[in-house]
Structure formats: structure tokens, C-alpha cells
Image: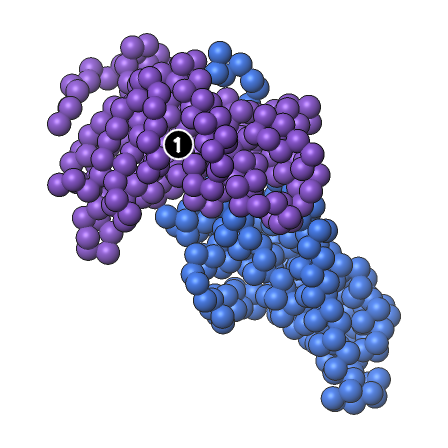
Chain colours: A blue, B purple
Amino acid sequence: MLSASVKPSTRSAFMLTLKRDLLIAFKRKNDIVNPFMFFVIVISLFPLAISPEGEKLAEIAAGVIWIAVLLSAMLSMDSLYRGDFEDGSLEILLLSPHPLFFLVLAKNIAHWLVSGFPVVIASPLLAYMLKLPSESYGTLMLTLLIGTPTLSLIGSIAVALTVGLGSRGLILAVITLPFSVPVLIFGTLAVQASASGLPAGGYLTLLLALLAGSLSLAPLTSAAALRISVS
Amino acid sequence: MNQITESSPAPDAPLPGGPLLEVRDLSCERDERVLFAGLSFVVDCGTVLQIAGSNGSGKTTLLRILCGLNDGYDGEIIWRGESTDDTAESFVGDLLYFGHRVGVNKILTPLENLRWSAGMQRTVNDQLLLDALAAVGLRGFEESPCYTLSAGQQQRVSLARLRLSPATLWVLDEPFTTLDVDAVAQLEQTLADHARQGGAVIVTTHHKLTMPSLSRLTLGMS
């Protein structure tokens, strides 16, 4: 009689987790707005500090945008598992009868939708501010579209590892940044290539490979890290 | 020691009369301090096991080990005749854990919390959720953010999972702490009902429980 009710499919558990995280994000708007504002502010400081001249700015535009993306991703990562760890929802997640891989993936996707995706959307506007040649806008958005989920997935591992620590401070950045460097390199190279009229396809392919790799491995690693963190 | 010699039953057909959960020679050390050693006990369907012991005697650690949240132990945990290492998926599907941190997000409403936390284990609809919340005395609070609720009310949100869970084994860590007198009586009744219907409960509390089929295990006696 106890097992009369139906166990939900992993798919519906995935959707439940995704919806829950999006709901939390929309109710706690700081988590969305702060990293995004940080991103915009960092970028708008460069014309002030370096030079408002179009030529100089265009040269550094790709790098500036990508570094700002990386830093704002760092800033947003912290909220990924911390709340769940503190209120005990993480234990419910770990003890649910579904593969943790998909639940972690759902959380990562929700996180990307609220932190990475707005950055992708806003990037042409900021690229315009930095006088990036307009023919590179497409490539920039594409690199960000592929690169930001990769950053979220990589960051998720570090957050999962450190969620149990009382004071984390810089450790999150120390773990995450080295792994994020390839994304940064290929992302900026692709934009620079397209700005100087060269094909960017090769770099985009490498970015896609990084995304594919982290999509398949990072949730596994995050799941294992979460198990270690709660024990 | 209540060691039971076991003649490995067929994987999918556990002995109907066999114990639901069996712990063999469990020991745990933390920070070079032995919390417990040589711990063996059996939890059958239809029983409530109260784990008692002074503060710091390892009650919470024991529960977390049983659930698989903590793997810093030696010994064996047998679920329906098989080690929990091998049956992890079917085991957690039949397990409900209630911890110190109750698993209630303060931004969400009780209804939204329960939709996720109960929905991970079984398919639910809003009517079921509302009924469960009403049953734990939260009628009228379904749509209030949980940060406006008291600690006891938040605990009730989590305890509403008990009314929805399909799990046979409930592992509850201090479920009575912040509840008022009525809620305590109600929860005791819920536990007794669960045992009567063939479920099993492992609960830590300093509370004096009175129910049939109750056994008690005290940690930190050695």
C-alpha cells in the first residue's frame, strides 16, 4: 500500500528542479541583477580609464567583454548551491531517487538562464559602446552563447566543492579561473579574428568542444563534489 | 551482538519476513574520537526505533550514515537483504530523510517548497499538496513566503512531506524540536500510523515517545 503512488520520471524531476531554481531566482532578484550590473559597470569603466578613442577601444573590446563576463560569472556562482546547502534542500536533492547528474544539470541550466543568458543578450550594446566593428557582433554573441554555459558548468564544480566551507573568499576564483582560461582564449580569439575579417569557425568549434566536454563531465564532477561536501 | 547469519536471498525477492534494514558492526570515528563502535541493530517493518543519547553522542551522524549522506564509517548496512552500496537507487527511493536543516527555502511559499521536495519522490498535484499542508496545520499559509513563518511552521512544511511520501523507511532527526504540544502529539500519531501500516521509522529525539512497537537504542553508553 505504501508504494501505491507513482514515482516521477527523471524528466519530471529535472523539470521540477529547473522550475524551482528559476522561481527562486526571480523571487530573489539581487542574484540576477547584481552580476549583470557588475558586468555592465566594469565594461563602462574602460572607455573612461583608457581612452574614448574608437580605435584603441576596438582593439581591446573583445578581451574586455570576455574578462567582464568571466568576473561576473564568478560573482554569480556563489549562489548556486549555497542556499540549498544552508536550508537543507541539498540533502533532499541528494536523497532523491533520480540520477544526480540530471538534477545538477537542471540547476546549472537554471543558473545559466538567469546569469549567463542576459549577458549574451546585452553584449551587442556593450560591444557598440567599445566600438567593436559591427560585423563581429554575431561572432561575439555566438562565443558568449557557447562560452557562458561552459563557465557556469565549470564554476559549478568549484562551488560544489567549497559549499561546505565556512569562509570561501578567493578559493572559488582560484579553483575556477585556471579552468576558464581556455574559454577566455578561444572566445577572444574568435572575436578578434572576425573583427579583422578572418574566419572564426575554428575557434568556435573549439569552444563547442569545450562546451560538449563540460556538459558531459562537469555535472558528474559537481554531483560527486556535492556528496563530499555534505558528508 | 545480534549478528544474523544470512543465506544471500535472491536479488529481487527479499525474504518477506526478513528485516527491512540491518546494521552490522557499524563504527564511526570523527576527529580521532570514536563516536560508536560495534553497533548492530535491526529495523523491521512496522516498528519505530528511537535513537537516544546525550548531545554529541553521534545520533545525527548515525542517521546520516544510514541514509548514505556520510560515508566515513566501517561496517555494513543491509537494506532488504542487500548492502546499500549496491541498492542505492531503490534504497533512496524508499527512504525519507528529515534533517536538522529542514529543507525549506525561505523565499518560496510552503506550497512551492512542497511541490518540489515531495514531487521528487512521487508525482503530486496541488490538491494533494494543499491537503497535506492543511493536515499539518498550515491552512491559510500556503501562499505566504516561508520567511514570514515561524520556525515551527517551517518545520511543519517539511513534515508535510511525511504525509505525501511513498517511502517505507522514515529517518527523522529531531523532528519534534520546535513543534508545539498539539503538533507533537499529531506527529507521534503520524509515526505510529506509519508503523502500523507496515512502514518503519528511525527517529532521534530527547522526547519521551509512547507508542506500540517502539524500541530504543542509546548511543554513548560504552
Q: Is residue B145 left or right of residue A174?
A: right
**Depicted B110 relative to depicted A158: above or below:** above
**Depicted A27 relative to depicted A158: above or below:** above
Residue A142: quarter of image: bottom right
Residue B26: quarter of image: top left
Q: Residue at x 63, y 27 (%)?
A: B134
**On the image, numbered disc 1 is attached to which residue?**
B171
Name the foreground residue: A25 vs A75: A25
Q: Residue at x 22, y 27 (%)?
A: B41
**Amino acid type indicated by mark 1:** Val
Q: Is residue A177 left or right of residue A133?
A: left
Task: Assess disc 1: are there few (<14), some (14-19) or many (≥20) residues with their C-alpha within 10 Å of its C-alpha.
Answer: many
Percent coordinates x, y for residue B141 in the rendering:
67, 37
Q: Is residue A101 left or right of residue A134?
A: left
What kind of element bears circle 1?
A: strand
Name the foreground residue: A183 vs A14: A14
Q: Residue at x 44, y 17 (%)?
A: B193
Name the foreground residue: B207 vs B10: B207
Percent coordinates x, y for residue A10 in the rendering:
57, 31
